[in-house]
Amino acid sequence: MLILHASWLAAETVETFFIWGEVAADAEGRKGRRRAAPRKPAGHPAQAPTSSLLTAARLSTGSGVTKSSALARLPTDDGQPLTARPLSAQGDAQPTLADWAIDGLALTAPAALSALVTWPTAAAPGVTLGADLRFWIAAARFALELLARQRYIPTLEEAGKTVVARWQPTWVDADEQARFQWLLSIAFSSHWKRACSSASTQVGCQRATAVLPASSRVGM
């Protein structure tokens, strides 16, 4: 089973959406002598090749989609990253966070939003969507609905010593507010923190803050 994950990369200038995947492994084969997590970021042992990601995500390179690599800070036990199953299914695992090198697909903000709002309802055979990717699909579609309803107003925002123009969402009815609160409850839940990988560019290994790009974020 191929599990697709996604996160916005931690970067100061370029907003990039990173998609990667892991092949779910049987935990029985992981038992044995305990090992320490690698001191230097090693390649994720269960990561899927980018060719499989293109097929599973129904994407193609070009038009804002490129093959890339990143670091992911993931729950790790016995020197191996845990699979994306509930922690209750991990047995007596006592994970810590460790950095792993992963290969995947880098999408520009426009390409990412286009992919998220048009993501097929039914996943391809043998493919499942991780909780992190499902969250971003829901958030992107909500942002698009607000745009279609003209729920944005122009504002100014301080950015260092300059001021930049931003579009700020405004709530009109209770349904919109309730959906936004639902997204917030997921974003700050303990399950989300376990499910959403903390990715960063190869330049550094800082913890990423998963947010919608500033051009379309929903007031987080």
Image (cartoon, rainbow, N blue to C red):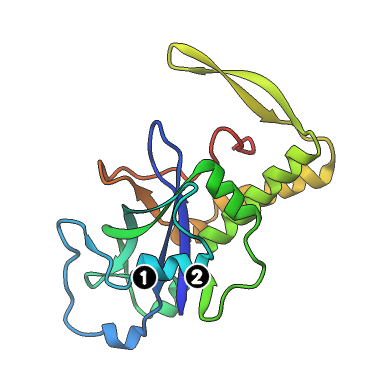
* 101 lies above or below 158: below
Which residue is farthest front? 62
* Cα separation between marks 2 and 1: 10 Å
Query: Which kind of residue does numbered mark 1 sit on?
Result: Ala
Q: Residue at x 54, y 49 (%)?
A: 112
* 40 lies above or below 149: below
**Left or right of 30: which side holds 130?**
right
Considering depth in this image, is 198 or 186 the residue closer to the camera?
Answer: 198
Which label belongs to residue 18?
A: none
Q: Are marks 2 and 1 in contact (CB under 8 Å)?
A: yes
**Left or right of 117: which side holds 34?**
left
Q: Position of residue 103 (x, y in %)?
A: 32, 60
Q: Residue at x 20, y 57 (%)?
A: 41
The quadrant in which the C terminus is found is top right
Mark 2 = which residue? 56
Tell me which corner region of the image, top left, top right, bottom left or bottom right, holds residue 219: top right
* 127 lies above or below 204: below
Which residue is farthest bottom? 28
Considering depth in this image, is 113 or 218 the residue closer to the camera?
Answer: 113
Query: Which kind of residue does numbered mark 2 sit on?
Result: Ala
Q: Tag 2, which secondary structure?
A: helix
Q: Residue at x 60, y 54 (%)?
A: 116
**Left or right of 46: which side holds 175?**
right
Q: Position of residue 37 (x, y in %)?
A: 20, 64
Q: How many marks?
A: 2
Q: Position of residue 140 (x, y in %)?
A: 63, 48
Mark 1 = which residue? 48
Q: Position of residue 191 (x, y in %)?
A: 51, 61
What is the crowding at mark 1: few (fewer than 14 residues within 10 Å), some, or many (at least 20)? Answer: many
Of callouts 2 and 1, the N-terminal one: 1
Q: Residue at x 23, y 73 (%)?
A: 78
Q: Tag 1, which secondary structure?
A: loop
